[in-house]
Amino acid sequence: MTLATLAARAADEIAAAVAAIDPAAMDGMVSEIATARRIACTGVGREGLMMRALAMRLYHMGLDAHVVGDMSCPPLGPGDLLIASAGPGGFSTVDGLIGVARSAGARVACVTAEPDGTAPKAADRIFHIPAQTMANDQTGATSVLPMGSLFEGAQYLAFELLILALRDHLGVAPDAMRARHTNLE
């Protein structure tokens, strides 16, 4: 396959995964985030990178958003939200952090491709992105992208669309978001 053909197929796969997200799930995430006092995002591996990108955009929105593991991440408690990524349904570290957050009284939203996994079952809200992950990349894999890349690419696009919906919901102007972007680059 040519580079152009691979790029088109990968883009089509990501678009199809995001288009398959239940609009009610998107609306639910908007509401969950909009009502949270403080937000912490977590995930492992490349999913963790997508969660860092989401936390940055939430900060640009003017929300009190953090990344679990960063030295500046505050404790969570009642009124707070942990957004945890577990594409294949669960990871021991993510499952553990969900338990800590829930024990402290925080709500949990789980971003996943496998809604019957351990992490989504422990969450208050599930944001299901139906895409191939490493949990199913060796059995009937159809994506041109390797391993869990389809899920991670779909996360990026879904999160940017989530930010657009949240921006409209909260009435945040694009210029206000831009004003919060770092100048230390």
Image (cartoon, helix red, strand yellow):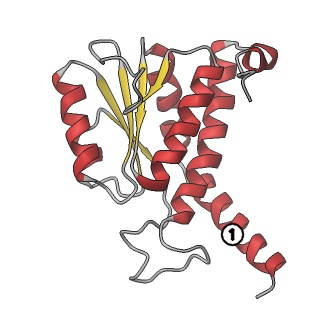
Residue, far left: 103
Near-viewer residue (151 or 116): 151
Please tell me whether residue 102 is drawn above or below residue 114 in the rendered image. Answer: above
Can residue 22 be seen here? The reply is no
What is the quadrant of residue 176 in the picture? top right
Residue at figure coordinates x 28%, y 21% from the top left: 106
Residue at figure coordinates x 29%, y 32% from the top left: 124
Near-viewer residue (39 or 36): 39
Q: Quadrant of the N terminus?
A: bottom right
Residue at figure coordinates x 63%, y 14% from the top left: 170
Residue at figure coordinates x 59%, y 40% from the top left: 159
Task: Give the residue number, with chain letter if any, for mark 1.
Answer: 10
Please tell me whether residue 159 is drawn above or below residue 32 in the rendered image. Answer: below
- Residue 20 is situated, as x and y percent measured from the top left of the image, at 57, 55
Can residue 106 be seen here? The reply is yes
Seen in the image, is 9 located left or right of residue 69? right
For label 1, count other residues whose C-alpha is less than 10 Å away and answer few (under 14), some (14-19) or many (20+).
some
- Residue 40 is situated, as x and y percent measured from the top left of the image, at 41, 27
* Amino acid bearing label 1: Ala
Seen in the image, is 2 located left or right of residue 125? right
- Residue 155 is situated, as x and y percent measured from the top left of the image, at 56, 49
Say which element carries label 1: helix
Seen in the image, is 92 located left or right of residue 48? left
What is the quadrant of residue 78 in the picture? top left
What is the quadrant of residue 77 in the picture? top left
Q: Quadrant of the C terminus?
A: top right
Q: In this figure, what is the number of numbered marks?
A: 1
Residue, far bottom: 1
